[in-house]
Amino acid sequence: MRLVSYGPVDDCRAGILFDDGIVDLEHSMRSAGVGVPVSDMTLFLQQDGWRGMLDGIAKAATREKRIELKTVRLGPPVPNPRKLMIAGANTHSHVKEAAPLLGQVPPPREPMILGKATSSIAGPYDDIVLPPETKKLDYEVELGVVIGKRCRRIGKAQVRDHVAGFVTTNEVSARDIQLAEHEEQSFYRVHFLGKSYDTFCPIGPALVTVDEFTWGKPLKLRTWVNGEIRQDSDTSDLCHGIEELVSYCSQAMTLMPGDVIATGSPAGVAFFMKPQKFLQDGDVVRCEVEGVGVIENRVKSER
């Protein structure tokens, strides 16, 4: 199933995406008589046994009125997660291209978990706002894993049962802020701030539930900027896979339904291009994860 959020920024409703439009999730739940009807996607994922409701909801949705896609804004499928985490330096190709910065080093032995403010989340077609503080705005296509069941200290074999599904993620960074280029000492890097400006994490277009995928099959990852392909790889490039990332994070903290973990980006980011090609006002960034979908965002300078 393809679950979406739709509507204004501060008033998104949960929906189900079909080829011919959107059906409101709360209305379908009422028609199906399953669970407690909710209008928010995170609240839906917090309901015990939500997976078992999907068949009934899908049948009820066939009788509900469609909302035309062109008439509404698609918001982030999970608009208000408690946590938004990212796996840094988590593809072999990205570690290799980073050699000028890192040296010839192996990937991290354990996942390098960074964070972004949840307020950085944006819809799949919203603008990416270019703040005046940066001149090095960068993109990273990543597979986003959405947690579907509360968990703590789970093993890798248990991960699939605790994942709701996947989203396409553009993990945007202000590289000069992230790497603290204003400081003489590189130790003073500020990854969190450089990755957490508003709109720095477009996700979507839908939360595609895990039953739509062959678990473990590599998924292609691609990024285009103004039609030029910049990143072209797949998830077999990950140093630490989905099972390891989710299990690892769960050792430190309780993962909650709706939490998002971005799993890592392949080579091709602007920072390591020669010459560097950072995002500028008016650029259009298109990111795709196979089976999940495309998100496309225009860069607009903050006014």
Image (cartoon, rainbow, N blue to C red):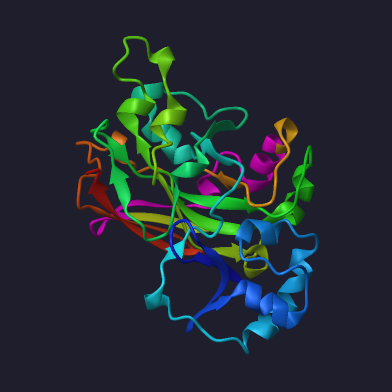
Nearest the eye: 26 or 46: 26
Q: Residue at x 71, y 34 (%)?
A: 253
Check the picture and name the quadrant holding the C terminus.
Answer: top left
From the viewer's perspective, is 168 left or right of 3? left
Q: Residue at x 19, y 36 (%)?
A: 275
Q: How many marks?
A: 0
Residue 20 place in picture, x, y as percent: 47, 84
From the viewer's perspective, is 182 left or right of 165? left
From the viewer's perspective, is 149 left or right of 1? right
Query: Would you say residue 271 is visible in this rendering?
Result: yes
Check the picture and name the quadrant holding the N terminus.
Answer: bottom right
Residue 117 place in picture, x, y as percent: 50, 38
Residue 55 place in picture, x, y as percent: 73, 78
Above or below: residue 281 compared with residue 104: below
Q: Is residue 40 magenta?
A: no
Above or below: residue 51 compared with residue 164: below
Q: Residue at x 22, y 41 (%)?
A: 277
Q: Which residues are magenta?
A: 224-249
